[in-house]
Image: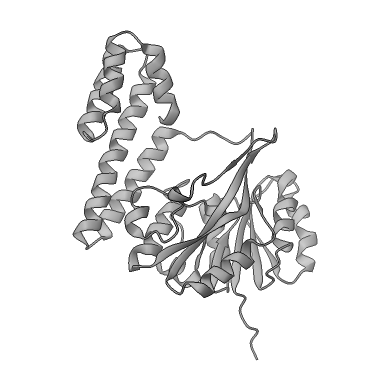
Amino acid sequence: MAERAPFVSVIMPTYNLVAYTADALDSVRAQTFADFEVVIVDDGSTDNTVDIVKPFLADPRFRLIEQPNAGTSAARNTAISHAVGEWIALLDCDDLWLPDKLARQAELIAEHPDAALVFGNGIEFNETGDEWPFYRKREVFPDGAGLDRLLKGNCFWALTVMVRRRDVLDAGMLRADTPGVDDYDLWLKVLEDGGVARGVWEPIARYRKRRDSQGVNKAVMFELLLKVYEDARDRQPDPRLRSLAEDRLARTRSDLLLVKARQSLEDTAACRKYMFAAWRQYPRRLKPIAMLAALTMGRRGSVAKALARKW
C-alpha cells in the first residue's frame, strides 16, 4: 500500500548561506506538528551548504535535491515539482519558524474550509537585536482578505504562507520573470477563484534582515510589479476587480516615475518633470504636487528625504 502523503511540504531553496541554513532546518524539525516533509533544493552552492544539510537527511521527512544555479524561483519550482504534500509552505534558508507555526495553521485550515491561503504574523529582526512585528495593528491584519484586498498590494510575508499544492500547480508555480515579486504573483492567482486568506495573529515566524543582503532596486521592483498587475488585469473577467488592477497599475507607474524623480534630484528640471508625470499618472496621490512645491521653494533636502522613504 502506498504511503500517505504528508499534510504539508516545506519548500526550502539553499544557496551559499552556510551560517544560517542549519538554524532554519532546525526550526522546521522542532515543529510540534509532525505531518510534514521538507524538500530542500540546493541551487548550486559554492560553499559547504550541502554538507550542512546532509545530517538532516537522517530524518526521512527531509530530502535534498542538487541543481546548477538557476535562481530562487527555479529552485522553489524544482522543490514544488517533487513535493507530495496537500499544502505547500515556503521557508528561505536564513529565516526561522517558531515551533507552533505549522500546528497553528493546520488548526486554522480545519476551522476555515474557505481558506485558499493561510498566513501569520511574525517578527523581523536584525543582527544587532532590533525587532519589529510584521503587522503592528489588528486593523491592518488582512485576515479574511480576498483578491480585492490583495490587488491593493502584497500583504503577506512569504515565510508564513501556506497554499494548496494543487492551486500552486494550477497557477503554473512561480514565475521566473518576476524575481522578488513572484510570490505575490502566485498569491494573486491562488485567490482568483474566490477563496480567502486566513491568518494567525500571534507571531509564528522570524524574518532575518541581514546586513549583507542586497538592497532592493526600486525601479526594477516597480517594473516587475507592472508585469504582475498587467497580467492580473488581463486574466480578470470581473469589471470591479479589473478596475482595481487598473488602479494599481496607475499607482505603480506613478511609483516608477517617483523613483526616476529621486534619481534626478541633481537635475531640477528633470526631477520636476518626473514628479509632475507621477501626479498625472495617479492624480489621487497629492504627494508629488507637495514635493514639487517644496522643490520650487528650494527645499531639496526635504524632498530627498520624502522620496527616500519609499522611492
Which residue occupies the extreme bottom position in the image?
Answer: 1
Q: Quadrant of residue 75?
A: bottom right
Residue pictured at 24% horizontal, 48% vertical: 246
Q: Is residue 193 above or below residue 220?
A: below
- Left or right: 268 with respect to 35? left
Question: Could you tell me how many numbered marks the image carries?
Answer: 0
Residue 124 x, y percent position in the rendering:
60, 43
Residue 57 x, y percent position in the rendering:
76, 65
Quadrant (top left/top right/bottom left/bottom right) for the C terminus: top left
Residue pictured at 27% horizontal, 33% vertical: 285
Q: Is residue 63 above or below residue 234?
A: below
Decide if residue 106 is in sight here.
yes
Residue 139 x, y percent position in the rendering:
43, 49
Decide if residue 82 is in sight here.
no
Residue 274 x, y percent position in the rendering:
27, 24
Residue pictured at 48% horizontal, 45% vertical: 180
Residue pictured at 69% horizontal, 35% vertical: 127
